[in-house]
Amino acid sequence: MPTPLPSLPPLARVEPFPAAAFADLEPLPAPATDLWDRIVAGYAIPDLDGPLVAKWEQWYADRPEYVARMVERSRRYLYHIVSEVAARNMPAEIALLPMIESAYNPNALSTSRASGIWQFMPSTGRHYGLAQNFWVDSRRDVLAATDKALVYLTKLHKDFSDWQLALAGYNWGEGNVGRAITKNQAVGAPADYDNLPMPEETRNYLPKLQAIKNIVRDPEKYGLALADIPDAPYFTVVKTTKKMDTKLAAELAEMPLADFLALNPQHNRPVIAGADEHSILLPIDRAEIFAAKLELTDQPLVSWQAYRMRPNETLRQVAGRYAMSIETLQAVNGLSARAKVPVGHTLLVPAQLPSKEVVASLAQAVFTSVPSGRTFYYTVKRGDTLYRIGARYGVTAQELRAWNGLTGEALNAGRKLRVTSDVVPVAQAGGKTKRAVATKGAVKQGNLAGKPAASKASPNGKPEPSAKRPVPPTARANGSAGG
């Protein structure tokens, strides 16, 4: 016979909480619906206010097309950078920094040779292990440069215990900020961002970022509309040990070459080479297609190879050996007609002995054309080549010849060349003209002002709003992460 269960006491009556008990509770934040919401929710650097912020708010508000192009470029990279920033517990607005550094153009190159979306100077790039060689410039590598930029910013924050000073150090140079702090402390003056003496460029640096923060928070307030960016990965990483042409890689992924290069802008040559293993970035929906077609392809993967100059050898001899004209060999390798190539210098040549038609096709594939843009005139400088000028503005040497009625490679300094590109020169306030060097899809960039005195790490000169001509605050003369 089963043992009877013990009797339980009667349940106590539960009184409902009065509605007033919840009156003072803050509502839970709504989940982020897109990446902009996530960024705004993670803002952590104290806001600035004042005339400089208002000036830059107006600057961007007056240029909706510029903002739209910048946002469109950022679409490929922003999720990755926001996620990396969050993983390191950094303020979310750090992910907006490339907007004032390079307008999110991975090919932006300043006149002082700062490169990539984070505008690393050559020396600082080498210090942080970013390869710069015949095959690649990892300052343009989205993954590598983002990692090193965030490492550098984290170090600056550790040094100064203040994000505003860390950003000033990124722009002006950590040594300069440190010395300014020491001087203020020596006379009993405040040593914060607002009170440190600094170049005008650096004084405007945080107000520009603040203007971008404010626009992202409430674009309608400024008459702007930011395209939605999903809070989801845009690209994935594909590892391969195979060397291959960038053009073929794009074809295997069934995507335009320009789009492939926008995700993989670090390659100096039309070949993915230079390391035992390569990381290729592909849109999420292209990765499986690429892997499947790579497995099935039976065509040669590489059309180019590296060649080292031998003793007593001439460029004409090398060109003849590979069925190329000397002009094509010079153009492919960015050499002027008068360039003297030393023994051991690395050249790019066809991997096999091709026909003249194939050589012409290969040379054309080195750069893709910009389909549209503005027309302006470029003044040829000593040492310029059609190849280099074309690379600077994202057009081909063949296009420059067609636009200017040229048949060969010879250029005279002082000649004006007609160029149609989305990268256009902008006059400086001082009357001189400097140009941002960038390739395909680059935003119009300019006002590359001079370097602040004794600056070791100042990106971007001093782009000031002008009533005469728009002056984008990007790709300035002095690279941000500079040595």
Image (cartoon, rainbow, N blue to C red):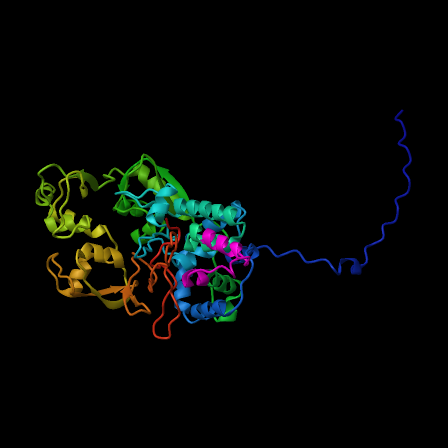
Would you say residue 288 is visible in this rendering?
A: no
**Residue sitting at the far bottom:** 467
Residue shown at the point (88%, 44%) measured from the top left: 11
**Residue segment shown in magenta:** 177-205
Residue at left offset 34%, top offset 75%:
468
Q: Where is residue 374 in the image (x, y as percent from the top left)?
A: 28, 67
The percent position of residue 390, horizontal first and vertical second, equals 22, 57
Q: Please state if 277 lies on the left or on the right of 21 as rendered.
A: left
Q: Is residue 225 placed above or below 171 in the rendered structure? A: below
Which quarter of the image is occupied by the N terminus?
Answer: top right
- Residue at image position (31%, 46%) is 137
- Residue 185 falls inside the magenta stretch: yes
In-front residue for pair 439/293: 439
Please state which of residues 468 and 407 is positioned toward the viewer in this rendering: 468
Placement of 1 over or under 74, stated as above or below? above
| Outermost residue to the top | 1
Residue situated in front as seen by the camera: 178 or 392: 178
Q: Nearer the viewer, residue 291 or 153?
A: 153
The percent coordinates of residue 271 (x first, y second) are 26, 43
